[in-house]
Image (tube, rainbow, N blue to C red):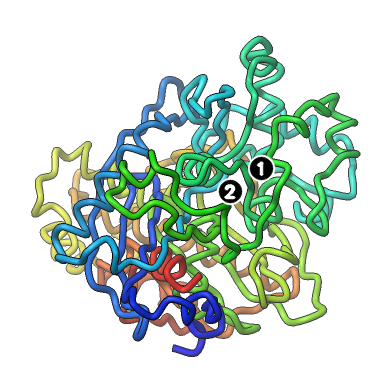
Amino acid sequence: GDHLRRFATAPRARAAMAPKYVLGVDGGTGGIRAGLFEIATGAPVGFADTPYDTTHPEPGYAEQNPIDWWNGMGASVRRVLAETGVAPEDVAGLCCDTTCCSVVALDDAGDALMPCILWMDMRAAEQTEQVLATGDPALRVCGGGAGPVSAEWMIPKALWLKQKKPALFASAARVCEYQDYLNLKLTGVYCASLNNVAVRWHFVDGAAPKSLLEKLNLEELLDKWPKDVLAPGARVGAGLTEAAAAHLGLPVGLPVAQGGADAFIAMIGLGVIEPGQLALITGSSHLHLGVAPAGADVGGPGVFGSYLEALPGVAGVVEGGQTSTGSVVRWFKAVCGGDDAFYDDVNEAAARVPPGCEGLVVQEHLQGNRTPHVDPASRGAVVGLTLKHGRAHVYRAILEGISFGTRLIFDSMKDAGYVPESVTVAGGATNSELWLQIHADVAGVPFKRTRCADAPALGCAAL
């Protein structure tokens, strides 16, 4: 489509006519997915997934092992090539997106010193208060400067590391994100994405928030962050190193393009690049990313943004989000001991439950609230249970609770001056007709689906 052409790096693609495909790699919460796409049409050729584990050592904590990401990427890339029969020399390049803000502390060799503090981890709640108390201008994107500040973001997590694990923090050569870790493994180049730093690191006009870090006595973080910041689509170093090429089964020097945060890169894959359009990215969490009109600095209580440098060619992005959505659905499946047929069975049964679930209400804050309350201490609730209620009632109440959380975010955006004209949805929720219909009914906005639901990987392919 036109949006793919707009973000394509045409001069580079035309310089090498022989390769026919590009790889888009989506590093998600539950696993890493490699997608192979035709250059000429943007059509998907095949996908391969490799799951990895998330652990919750304490309430509100969420951790992953970074080496699982790298091993998973190798497995997914090799498998998609094998299953599609595409020769490695027919691949023109690759690009990755990842969860954000998943923070890692690395040694000089680029290896993790501790488990990753995953994006959904809320341990830095205390540190968010310290960040907000600075009153620094870089906090503009957090409710117009009034806050709250999210515990999911880079600076609160880095501050937690310094205050709670000072020896480890001092010894860390690098403090960065999942995105930066992968690019370092792929190319040997330590760099950040302009997308990530604009939306989660409090960068302003592409520059690090020095005054904010000084007020927090966190200036040494500047030496641990990447010095180079590359826009999405920019080439990273000289491409794949020998070690990375051997790991992935691809040619040495294969071009690597900079990606960014999964949901933002998905906006490209969905074609959500015009003012008034909003991308609803569903997975373990929900992200609501709206394109703001040129020159409009949308912001206010309960809204993140506008991010003015989030994506190339997009004037500004306004954000809302729900921390635990698909993860609540998966949690319920696990609690029920569900098998492979669980979702089909429970969706069919829930469709027969009347709206409102006969008085049963679920609040989906099992991992806190991202927006509009920005409250890491908020917790989930199931209210109104009776002996009349069964599994299908609880399942539908979860879907309804998540959908009303989205409606609350849309109302907060409206109060801040942004009203979505259409919603384009991608991710796990698209697998449930029931959930999509509930979402659309509650939101009161037209919902659209695209032919390719793998929007993050497609966005990477376009870059």
Q: Are marks 2 and 1 in contact (CB under 8 Å)?
A: yes
Look at 31% across and 41% down and name the residue there: 247
Q: What's the amino acid at mark 2?
A: Arg
Q: Secondary structure at mark 2?
A: loop
Look at 26% across and 50% down and name the residue there: 76
Residue 13 position within the rendered picture, expressed as x and y whole percent measured from the top left: 47, 77
Task: Looking at this view, name the residue that lies furthest to the bottom.
Answer: 2
Residue 391 position within the rendered picture, expressed as x and y whole percent measured from the top left: 18, 49
Residue 148 position within the rendered picture, expressed as x and y whole percent measured from the top left: 74, 44
Q: Nearer the viewer, residue 7 or 290?
A: 7
Q: What's the amino acid at mark 1?
A: Ser
Q: Residue at label 2? A: 370
Q: Nearer the viewer, residue 31 or 333?
A: 31
In the image: residue 273, left or right of residue 219: left
Q: Nearer the viewer, residue 311 or 142?
A: 311
Look at 53% across and 81% down and name the residue there: 10
Q: CA distance from mark 2 to mark 1?
A: 7 Å
